[in-house]
Image (cartoon, rainbow, N blue to C red):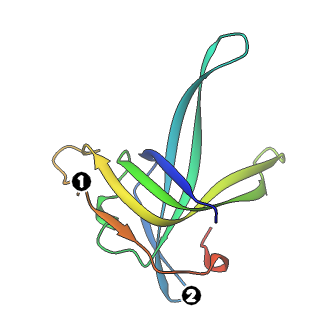
């Protein structure tokens, strides 16, 4: 079994799509981390994960740009060619659990803090990205 746990902020509002007659909620999560190089220089990097939540329930309206979330699921990598023609890799996650961790990304809107959802088994072949 392989499992990924990720905490970060949503890069944009989640988007509901339909693939093979099933609903899927797509969103991206950015995880920032700081580290020291061998020379002692402090650097920061952002790792993006493209997420797919199959058969989503009512959590979709709460997954707004900037929302702080905990996501877990099955990760996989996808190779592609970037805009400069260079090989690149993308981190994808088939989400099994998502939890809202706090703070409203937009003033005056509910965050649904504490809401969580899980999805039923969905074949990896049907991922919409």
Q: Residue furthest front?
A: 1
- Residue drawn where x is 45% and y is 56% of the image: 71
> Considering the image in quadrants, where does the N terminus appear?
bottom right
Relative side of 95 to 76, left or right: left
For disc 1, the marked residue is 113
Q: Position of residue 21 (x, y in %)?
A: 50, 89
The secondary structure type at the circle numbered 2 is: loop
61 relative to 48, above or below: below
Q: Earlier in the sequence, mark 2 or mark 1?
A: 2
For disc 2, the marked residue is 20
Q: Position of residue 107 (x, y in %)?
A: 20, 43
Relative side of 53 to 20, left or right: left
- Residue drawn where x is 52% and y is 81% of the image: 121
| Mark 2–mark 1 distance (CA, rounded to whole Å) | 31 Å
**Quadrant of the rendered structure where residue 44 is?**
top right
Q: Residue furthest bottom?
A: 21
Query: Nearer the viewer's eye, disc 2 or disc 1?
Result: 1
**Quadrant of the rendered structure where residue 103 is?**
top left
> Are there few (<14), some (14-19), or many (20+) residues within 10 Å of tag 1?
some
Q: Position of residue 57 (x, y in %)?
A: 33, 75
Relative side of 108 to 23, left or right: left
């Amino acid at each position: 079994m392989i499992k990924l746990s990720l905490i970060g902020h949503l890069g944009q509002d989640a988007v509901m799509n339909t693939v093979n007659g099933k609903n899927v909620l797509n969103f991206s999560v950015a995880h920032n981390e700081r580290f020291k190089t061998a020379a002692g220089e402090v650097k920061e990097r952002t790792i993006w994960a493209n997420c797919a939540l199959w058969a989503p329930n009512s959590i979709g309206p709460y997954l707004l740009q900037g929302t702080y979330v905990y996501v877990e699921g099955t990760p996989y990598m996808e190779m592609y060619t970037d805009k400069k023609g260079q090989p690149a890799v993308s981190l994808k996650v088939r989400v099994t659990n998502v939890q809202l961790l706090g703070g409203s990304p937009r003033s005056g809107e509910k965050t649904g803090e504490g809401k969580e959802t899980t999805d039923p088994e969905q074949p990896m072949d049907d991922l919409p990205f």
